[in-house]
Image (cartoon, rainbow, N blue to C red):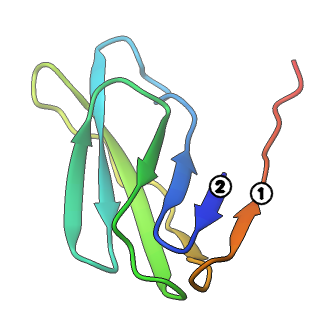
């Protein structure tokens, strides 16, 4: 996941019951906002404030309107202005 002073990359695994999943909601707990995404497994949250802690969760939804339970809360801090850092997660297959 990449973190800058104004953005955070979020990555997650597919929903366990992914047969009818059509998308995900990303809940920004810090800003009390929700973004609706298609059936993707990553998203870059932009427009964030530098040197600020943000907390996120996600929920899957299907075409019938069913919504999964909320994921665990992930918290990270944006960097100070001008800083840049990469934190990489690898899955070995």
Q: Position of residue 21 (x, y in %)?
A: 31, 21
The residue closer to the viewer here, 6 or 20, is 6
The residue under the point 48% across, 63% down is 7
N-term-proximal mark, 1 vs 2: 2
Give how far apart the Cα atoms at labels 1 and 2 are. 6 Å
Task: Residue under label 1, please give it.
Answer: 87
Q: Position of residue 6 (x, y in %)?
A: 46, 70
Residue 63 lies left or right of residue 44; in this view the side is left
**Residue 64: which quarter of the image?**
top left
Q: Position of residue 32 (x, y in %)?
A: 21, 75
The residue under the point 34% across, 49% down is 69
Task: Residue under label 2, please give it.
Answer: 2
Marks counted in the figure total 2
The residue under the point 33% across, 46% down is 59
Q: Position of residue 17 (x, y in %)?
A: 43, 22
Q: Quadrant of the C terminus?
A: top right
**Residue 87: which quarter of the image?**
bottom right
Secondary structure of the residue carrying tag 1 is loop
Label 1 crowd (10 A; few <14 / some 14-19 / many >=20): few
Secondary structure of the residue carrying tag 2 is strand
The residue closer to the viewer here, 6 or 26, is 6
Residue 69 lies left or right of residue 92; in this view the side is left
> Does residue 4 lie above or below 63 as drawn?
below
Residue 56 lies left or right of residue 53; in this view the side is left
> Does residue 15 lie above or below 50 as drawn?
above
Q: Residue furthest top?
A: 19
Label 2 crowd (10 A; few <14 / some 14-19 / many >=20): some
Question: Tag on residue 31?
Answer: none
Cβ–Cβ below 8 Å for labels 1 and 2? Answer: yes
């Amino acid at each position: 996941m990449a973190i800058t002073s104004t953005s955070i990359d979020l990555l997650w695994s597919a929903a366990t019951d992914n047969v009818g999943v059509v998308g995900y909601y990303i809940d920004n707990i810090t800003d009390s906002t929700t973004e609706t995404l298609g059936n993707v497994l990553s998203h870059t949250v932009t427009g964030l404030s530098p040197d600020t802690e943000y907390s996120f969760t996600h929920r899957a939804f299907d075409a019938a309107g069913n919504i999964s339970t909320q994921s665990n809360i992930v918290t990270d801090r944006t960097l100070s202005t001008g800083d840049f850092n990469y934190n990489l997660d690898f899955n070995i297959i």
